[in-house]
Amino acid sequence: MIEMLEKSSGNVVGVKINGRLVHEDYEQFLPKLESLIQEHGSLRWYCEMADFHGITPRAAWDEMKFDVKHRKDIERVAVVGDKASHEWMAKLSKWVFHSAEIRYFDVADADAAWEWVREGAEVPCSCGCCPEHDSNQ
């Protein structure tokens, strides 16, 4: 399952990946990402994989198609995990998203990962009280 995190805002998208990813996960999630890319032009990712148990072949194909299509639309990726395979996946992502900054963070450093992925991004305020923030929403 792919869960969008509440901290997501503007072009910063946080997701938590649980269990085994299947085609239906991508059918539900990729249209949201496509919409965000159209709205913002590029995205920054926070991807928490602490409870990730693999991906089906069809879901892997969905992932590859999206990645190739949007390889230039991703600015930064913070991969947060607790296994050596998660760190390896972050390194492998650099092959596809060659223009993006990609870093691996241990689960214990999740807050630092959020800070890094948001650094320099235009993240709108959701307070609703600031005129300059309202124009960014």
Image: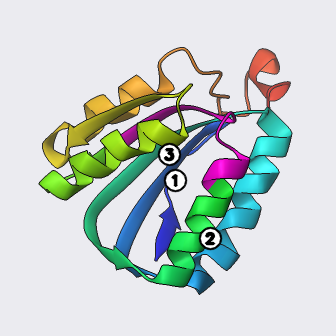
The residue beneath circle 2 is 62
**In front of the other: label 2 or label 3?**
2
Q: Does label 2 or label 3 sit earlier along the sequence?
A: 3
Please give left or right for residue 123 compared with residue 18 in the image: right
Mark 3, secondary structure of its residue: loop
Q: Residue 113, position in %: x, y?
A: 32, 33
Distance from the alpha carbon under mark 1 to that under mark 3: 4 Å
Residue 42 visible, this orientation? yes
What kind of colouring is applied to the model shown? Answer: rainbow
- Please, what secondary structure does the residue beneath circle 1 have? loop
Residue 8, x across and y down, in percent: 56, 45
Q: Is residue 118 above or below residue 60?
A: above
Mark 1 highlights which residue?
6
Of the image marks 1 and 2, the number of the one nearer the N terminus: 1
Closest to the camera, between mark 1 and mark 2, is 2
Magenta part of the chain: 67-78
CB under 8 Å between callouts 1 and 3?
A: yes
C-alpha distance separating marks 2 and 3? 25 Å
Task: Determine whether, in the image, residue 136 is placed left or right of residue 58.
Answer: right
Residue 7, which numbered label? 3
Crowd around label 2: few <14 · some 14–19 · many ≥20 (10 Å): some
The amino acid type of the residue labelled 1 equals: Glu
